[in-house]
């Protein structure tokens, strides 16, 4: 007989395990962890694979094109600008005189004298252009063609004066003024033709290339050329 009190249990109480087979959850957890690690590893590789398989097309580098003209040609382009300005002034004079007469703001004698003065100025300009001494050899042919077109301007003013004095309703004068403007447009086109020939004398470089002048060659200058389009006013019948 022991010293235990009957009905008392000397062992500590032990909680009951609701799942006597707790080891069965370990394998699914391991599998789940492996899946997570695999997904993480694969996602870490995707950018590298995508980068290796992607081709990026870049636009070509921009280039600057420079046209280098001989010095005498570049200087003559300035002369052409002066010609254009002078022709615009002559056309404006004819328009102003004709408009004043149409509005009867001047007498016929004053209108005739003004047309004659304009004709004289155009004839003097024709002589100056024809006698131009600094025409580059490369532009000589185009310059001669320009002079030939300018020569037709003064006779066109003579036709305006004849129309002014004609005993009609002014139709002859108006037609002569229109013909003068048309000839002025032809002269503008001839000036542009000289400019176009000037551009063919230049050397065009681009993409980082350089243009140099060798021994004995004529000095060159870089110049950007522009063409001005001018509209001559027209008369209204």
Image (tube, rainbow, N blue to C red):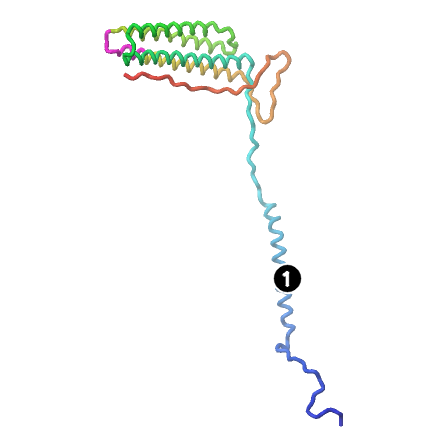
Q: Quick check: 82 left or right of 26?
A: left
In percent of width and height, residue 156 lies at 34, 8
65 is higher (above) or lower (below) than 3: above
Q: Quadrant of residue 180?
A: top left
Magenta residue check for 136:
no
Q: Quadrant of residue 108?
A: top left
208 is higher (above) or lower (below) than 155: below
Magenta region's main secondary structure? helix
Residue at left offset 56%, top offset 19%? 222
The range drawn in magenta is: 167-176
Q: Quick check: 4 left or right of 129?
A: right
In percent of width and height, residue 113 lies at 33, 5
Residue position for label 1: 34
Residue extending farthest bottom? 1
Q: Residues within 10 Å of mark 1 (few under 14, many from 20)?
A: few
Residue at left offset 46%, top offset 19%? 227
Residue extending farthest left? 168
Residue at left offset 23%, top offset 9%? 168
Residue at left offset 34%, top offset 13%? 96
Q: Name the one closer to the observer, 58 or 104.
A: 104
In percent of width and height, residue 66 lies at 55, 22
Magenta residue check for 171:
yes
Q: Quadrant of residue 170?
A: top left
Q: Quadrant of the C terminus?
A: top left
Q: Quick check: 45 left or right of 166?
A: right
């Amino acid at each position: 007989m022991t010293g235990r009190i009957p009905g008392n249990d000397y062992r500590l109480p032990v909680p009951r395990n609701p799942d006597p087979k707790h080891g069965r959850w370990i394998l699914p957890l391991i599998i789940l962890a492996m899946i997570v690690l695999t997904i993480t590893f694969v996602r870490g590789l995707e950018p590298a694979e995508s980068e290796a398989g992607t081709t990026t097309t870049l636009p070509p580098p921009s280039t600057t094109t420079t046209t280098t003209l001989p010095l005498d040609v570049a200087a003559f382009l300035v002369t052409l600008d002066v010609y254009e300005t002078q022709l615009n002034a002559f056309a404006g004079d004819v328009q102003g005189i004709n408009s004043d007469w149409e509005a009867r703001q001047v007498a016929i004698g004053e209108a005739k004298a003004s047309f004659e003065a304009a004709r004289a100025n155009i004839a003097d300009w024709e002589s100056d252009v024809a006698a131009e001494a600094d025409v580059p050899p490369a532009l000589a042919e185009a310059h001669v063609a320009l002079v030939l077109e300018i020569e037709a301007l003064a006779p066109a003013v003579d036709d305006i004066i004849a129309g002014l004095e004609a005993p009609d309703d002014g139709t002859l004068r108006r037609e002569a003024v229109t013909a003068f403007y048309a000839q002025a447009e032809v002269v503008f086109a001839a000036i542009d033709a000289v400019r176009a020939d000037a551009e063919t004398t230049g050397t065009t470089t681009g993409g980082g290339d350089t243009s140099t002048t060798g021994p004995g060659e004529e000095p060159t200058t870089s110049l950007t050329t522009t063409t001005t389009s001018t509209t001559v006013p027209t008369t209204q019948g």
